Image: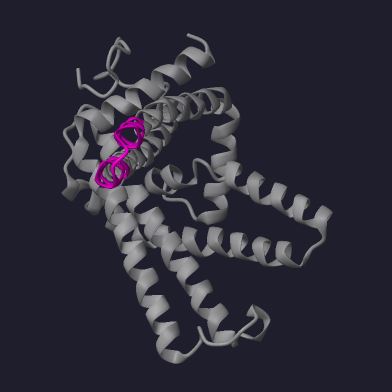
C-alpha cells in the first residue's frame, strides 16, 4: 500500500471514529465555549480597569498588551488540553476499546504537566515571532512567517509524542520532526483529503440560504441563514475532532505500523457510519 492509499485510508478511518464516538465532539465544543468565556472575562477585565479606553493602539497602556499575552497563553493551553482528550479517546478506539468522555478528561489531566510545558514552549515561540514580525519590513515579515509555518509543521506530532512518550517540549519537537520525515506523504494526503471532504460538505450549507433568498421573505432568509450557521458550526466541530483523530491515527501508524484493526477493510460508502 502506497503513501496515498494509506493517507486516504487514515482519512476515512478518522471520520469513522468521529461517527462511532460522537461524544468526542464535546471536546472541541467545550474548547470553543471555554475560550469564548475567558475572552469575555478578559475583555470585561480590560473594560473595568480602563485599558480599553484611549485612541491609537500605541497609546494604550502596557496592561492592554499584558491582558492579550495572557489570553494567548491561556487559550493555547485550553486548545491543547481538549486536543489531548480527543487524541486519547481516538487511540482507545483504534486499539479496540470503547472510549468515554471520562476517558478523554482522564488522559488530559494525566498529561496536564506536559500540556503546560508545551504551552509555555510553543506559545512563547509563537508570541515572539509574531511580535518581531509586526516590527519587521516586508521581507522580514515573509521570513518570520515562513519560520512560524516551519515550526507549526515541525511540531505536528508533538502532542501525541508527549502524551505517549512523556518527553519534554524540546525532545518532543525533535521526535515530532523524526516521525514527520517517515509519514509526510500520509500526513499530506490525510489532511488534504479531510479538507476536501469537509469543504464539499460545507457547500451543502449554502442550500438553506439559497432557498431562503429564492422565497424572498425576511423570515425565510433569517431562517435559512440560521440553519446554515448551525450546520457549519456542527461541521466545524466534526472537522476539528477529525483532525485530532487523524493526528492520533498518523502517530499510531508511524510508531506501530498499524492503521486500525477495528476499521480495517472498510469502504468509503459512508465514512461517518460505524462499521
Position in image of residue 242 (x %, y %): 36, 35
Residue at (35%, 76%) from the top-left corner?
A: 41
Residue 32, picture quadrant:
bottom left
Residue 54, picture quadrant:
bottom right
Asked whether residue 33 is in view, the answer is yes
Position in image of residue 78 (x %, y %): 37, 60
Q: Is residue 193 above or below residue 151?
A: above
Question: In the shown orientation, is residue 222 left or right of residue 178?
Answer: left
Q: Is residue 77 above or below residue 191?
A: below
Question: In the shown orientation, is residue 129 left or right of residue 123?
Answer: right
Magenta residues?
Answer: 207-225
Q: Is residue 189 above or below residue 49?
A: above
Position in image of residue 186 (x %, y %): 51, 23
Identify the main secondary structure in magenta. helix
Question: In the shown orientation, is residue 32 left or right of residue 255?
Answer: left
Residue at (18%, 47%) from the top-left corner?
A: 101
Asked whether residue 258 is in view, the answer is no
Q: Is residue 255 magenta?
A: no
Amino acid at each position: 500500500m502506497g503513501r496515498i492509499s494509506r493517507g486516504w485510508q487514515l482519512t476515512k478511518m478518522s471520520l469513522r471514529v468521529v461517527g462511532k464516538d460522537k461524544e468526542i465532539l464535546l471536546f472541541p465544543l467545550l474548547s470553543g465555549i471555554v475560550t469564548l468565556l475567558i475572552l469575555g472575562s478578559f475583555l470585561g477585565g480590560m473594560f473595568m480597569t480602563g485599558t480599553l479606553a484611549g485612541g491609537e493602539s500605541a497609546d494604550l497602556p502596557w496592561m492592554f498588551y499584558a491582558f492579550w499575552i495572557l489570553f494567548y497563553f491561556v487559550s493555547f493551553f485550553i486548545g491543547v488540553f481538549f486536543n489531548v482528550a480527543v487524541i486519547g479517546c481516538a487511540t482507545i478506539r483504534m486499539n479496540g476499546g470503547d472510549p468515554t468522555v471520562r476517558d478523554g478528561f482522564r488522559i488530559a489531566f494525566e498529561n496536564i504537566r506536559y500540556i503546560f510545558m508545551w504551552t509555555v514552549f510553543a506559545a512563547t515561540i509563537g508570541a515572539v515571532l509574531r511580535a518581531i514580525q509586526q516590527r519587521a519590513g516586508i521581507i522580514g515579515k515573509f521570513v518570520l512567517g515562513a519560520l512560524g509555518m516551519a515550526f507549526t509543521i515541525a511540531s505536528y506530532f508533538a502532542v501525541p509524542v508527549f502524551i505517549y512518550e512523556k518527553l519534554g517540549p524540546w525532545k518532543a519537537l525533535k521526535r515530532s520532526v523524526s516521525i514527520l520525515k517517515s509519514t509526510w506523504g500520509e500526513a499530506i494526503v490525510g489532511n488534504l483529503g479531510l479538507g476536501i471532504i469537509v469543504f464539499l460538505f460545507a457547500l451543502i450549507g449554502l442550500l438553506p440560504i439559497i432557498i431562503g433568498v429564492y422565497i424572498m421573505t425576511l423570515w425565510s432568509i433569517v431562517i435559512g441563514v440560521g440553519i446554515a450557521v448551525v450546520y457549519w458550526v456542527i461541521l466545524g466541530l466534526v472537522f476539528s475532532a477529525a483532525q485530532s483523530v487523524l493526528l492520533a491515527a498518523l502517530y499510531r501508524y508511524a510508531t506501530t505500523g498499524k492503521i486500525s484493526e477495528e476499521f480495517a477493510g472498510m469502504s468509503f460508502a459512508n465514512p461517518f457510519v460505524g462499521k
